Image (spheres, helix red, strand yellow):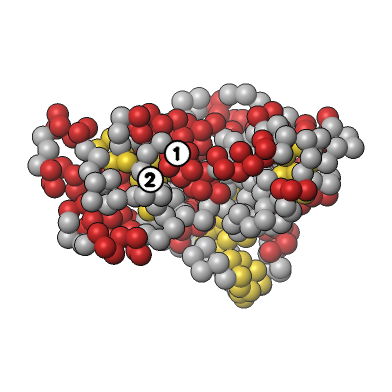
Amino acid sequence: MKKFNVPPTYRSPLIAAIKQRRKDADKLKKDFSPTPLHLGPLTIWLARHFGFCYGVENAIEIAFETIRNHPGKRVFLLSEMIHNPQVNADLLALGVQFLQDTKGKQLISFDELTPQDIVIIPAFGTTLSIEAQLRERGIETAAYNTTCPFVEKVWNRGEQIAAKGYTIVVHGKPGHEETRATFSRAAASTPTIIVNDLKETKLLGEFITGERSSESFHEIFSGQYSKGFDPTKDLEKIGVINQTTQLSSDTLAIADYLKQLMIGHYQLTPDKIALHFADTRDTLCYATNDNQTAVREMLQTPADLAIVIGGYNSSNTSHLVELCEQHLPTWFIDAPDRLLTEKMIEHRRWDSKELLVCENYLPAKQPVTLLITSGASCPDAVVDAVIHRLAGFYGVTPELEELTRNWCD
């Protein structure tokens, strides 16, 4: 896989050495067991896969190269490059300005742009409407488009099934940038609807089977369907694609539910399923799958708690928190200084988004075993800093330095 030119401040010698050794020993990525860091009374288990994915590194490389190669030019980001506070703060410090926030609210009017300006499209992609608005103002978007190739893969798959007459069901968070972009592409070709979860999917199923009157459709799915969507005819032939950072198990559950519903409703034999349902399992992102599988494997290790590191508005990171919380106490932080002291932590609830300060988050006993992972937009240097902060709390910084030397030799 391509190696990207990412600022060295985002790297960690320890994490890089661990990842490289694991990769060398497991080139086919069949071993998802975590990596232990034994530090006297403190043991940390690192997930097999975590941190920057291909799409994130690609976006970071393009963004920083664009800034470096165009001194004196105004450089804008359509919205946050990725959902990581450190990276976005670094870009702002270099003079980059955001045109929109993560919800699509305009921060700087497109009318202020000139053909001499540079606008970088974030890794999530953007809508066809916004691309058209930028082109109308003479802005070249192709050269500065950092859309993740795996997001584009979803768009391409959507185009393929749309060409065969399928309505597209997008599994995603309706307000998320990637979901808005994917919905825009799909809706340009075929009737399209967004479902947030299995609960909403089951509601949609009631319109497919006729259990629920079509009159209530537009109220229940307000803002989540394409213009002119008619549930009486547009739900007869469907296919599922997804926001790539959703829980892979959730997307598969939604696709399986709708497939079985169509089979039962239309009394389909195996050779007739494609008449009403398109198999689109290949739209799941490899990094999302790997990170989630690695967390599930890590959770097989007995531990006192888990720490998940990443941007608070990062969808893929939130899902890692969700997985861990099903098994043991879990703390969601976006930076090492959220570990206020060895007694107090500032963390965020993944579901309510509430930021809380909690006491006695570390067990009052020794030895202690912790599980650590991070989201796909979190720099390894941040994970390294969290590990060093924890080592300081337990008085094992010399042991960590020795372990780092051993891994990096």
Which amino acid, by three-letter code, is at mark 2?
A: Thr
Q: Which residue is mark 1?
A: 188
Residue for badge 2: 192
Which residue is at 51% across, 56% downward? 175
Residue 268 position by quadrant: top left
Residue at position x 71%, y 56% in the image: 107
Give the camera-side residue of 342 and 60. 60
42 vs 360, nearest the viewer: 360
Picture residue at 37% right of the left edge, 39% below the top: 190
Amino acid type, label 1: Ala
What distance separates the C-alpha of mark 2 from that of mark 1?
9 Å
Decide if residue 25 is in sight here: yes
State which quadrant residue 196 falls in.
bottom left
Q: Residue 219: x and y, percent?
A: 35, 64
Percent position (x, y) of residue 146? 64, 35
Q: Is residue 327 visible?
A: no
Look at the numbered disc 1 and give the secondary structure of its residue: loop
Give the side of residue 182 with respect to residue 93, left or right: left
Image coordinates of residue 202 in percent, x first then y, are 27, 57
Tell me what residue is drawn at x 28 percent, y 41 percent: 238
Q: How many marks?
A: 2
